[in-house]
Image (cartoon, rainbow, N blue to C red):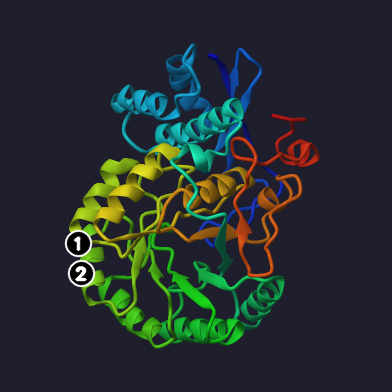
Amino acid sequence: MKIIDIRAVGLRGATPQGGWAQELTPEDNVHTLVTVHTDEGVTGTGSVFSSESLVRAALETLTPLCLGADPREPDRISQHLHQNTFWLGRGGAVTHTISGIDIALWDIFGLATGLPVSTLLGGRYRERVRPYASVLVEEPPVLTDNLARLAELGFTAFKIGWGRFGRISEAADEEIVRTARDAVGPHAQLAVDAGGSDAYWRRDRAWALRTADMLADYGIAWFEEALRPDDLDGFVQLRRASRVPVAGGEVLTRRQDFTRFLVAGAFDIVQPDTTKGGGLSESRRVAWFADELGVRFIPHGWNTAVGLAADLHLAAALPGTDLVEFKTGSAYIDELAGGGFCLDDDGMLPVPTGPGLGIRLNPEALARYAGVAGT
């Protein structure tokens, strides 16, 4: 089996808001699907958290490095791509695109062998994973309604963030957290994401420390992205002083970036995004290293159906990862996967059991949001 082509198509028309200072519109393209095609007719699908224009530009360099290779060797091919693109700069569009290729290669590996990706990653430690509903912060009455509705749907874990949090006043921040805790109840898991990777993030380390103290009073599970993503020393100081676990890492790429933060002791919880950090191959390496240092691994996933499926398989194949992020209300998740993703009675998501990623893409949704009839 050989790779004969790699294609990309962006998703548009239902892009959810991101809580960013420069807010997204439905027509903005921040998620791109990548398909790897083989001479035996087997096609794998990956997802990239980046725009179609950047992915297509990266593919001009990456595709020639893949042609003729056996797609059933995802880790080797991904490392080949990393090693031969240093001169373009680590991270950014090239690494993001490698992430989508890598996911697609694991999908092909599973389709060719008849096994789910999680089995190929080393074995399934669990058959279902708890999703936490990821919700943007809005005015308290709207936030209450959103969280109450999600609790009724069966979610038992939640994360609120971005939007208004950290951008108005500390009194407003506490009102937001109190509102959220009241909405989900005292026993639900609730995390807070400041969104420090937003453009021109203004909050400093002193604010992060004060906010961490406030969050501890509400039983918050973790404090995410409290600082700018490159503030290594700040994260180390915050973790030493915080009474709540400190989380971050969603914009870091490749294990080299994560190694610096993990060795320095910056995080209690590390959160690579598999759709931009290097794919399943690289996320697995980060998870193994984090485990050696006693750091919890929970993948970041502001995602598509393909990305969520990849995260479920990754979580299933890691002994200590029992949560995945679920971007609620996104058509790119709810509609793109045929049959969707359904919580069971315990608020858990089953890990797909079919070959590869184990999901079937909905051709009508692909036509609507990607302008194609299939992948």
Q: Position of residue 339 (x, y in %)?
A: 76, 49
Q: Position of residue 66 (x, y in %)?
A: 46, 18
> Residue at image x 53%, y 14%?
2
Residue type of the residue flagged with mark 1: Asp
> Residue at image x 68%, y 54%?
341
Q: Is residue 137 visible?
A: no
> Residue at image x 30%, y 25%?
83
Q: Nearer the viewer, residue 109 or 56?
A: 109
Give the answer, above or below, for where 113 lies relative to 198.
above
Which quadrant of the view contains residue 128?
Answer: bottom right
Q: Is residue 282 visible?
A: yes
Q: Secondary structure at mark 2?
A: helix
Whether pointer 2 and pointer 1 mark residues with C-beta atoms closer than 8 Å, the reply is yes
Q: Nearer the viewer, residue 363 or 28?
A: 363
Residue denoted by label 2: 237
Give the answer, above or below, for where 213 lies relative to 305.
below
Residue denoted by label 1: 233
Q: Nearer the viewer, residue 357 or 124?
A: 124
Quadrant where the C terminus is found in the figure: top right
Quadrant where the N terminus is found in the figure: top right
The reply, left or right, for residue 49 in relation to residue 362 is left
Q: Position of residue 291 (x, y in %)?
A: 30, 55
Q: Around disc 2, counting alpha carbons within 10 Å, would you say few (fewer than 14), some (14 to 19), or many (20 or more)?
A: some
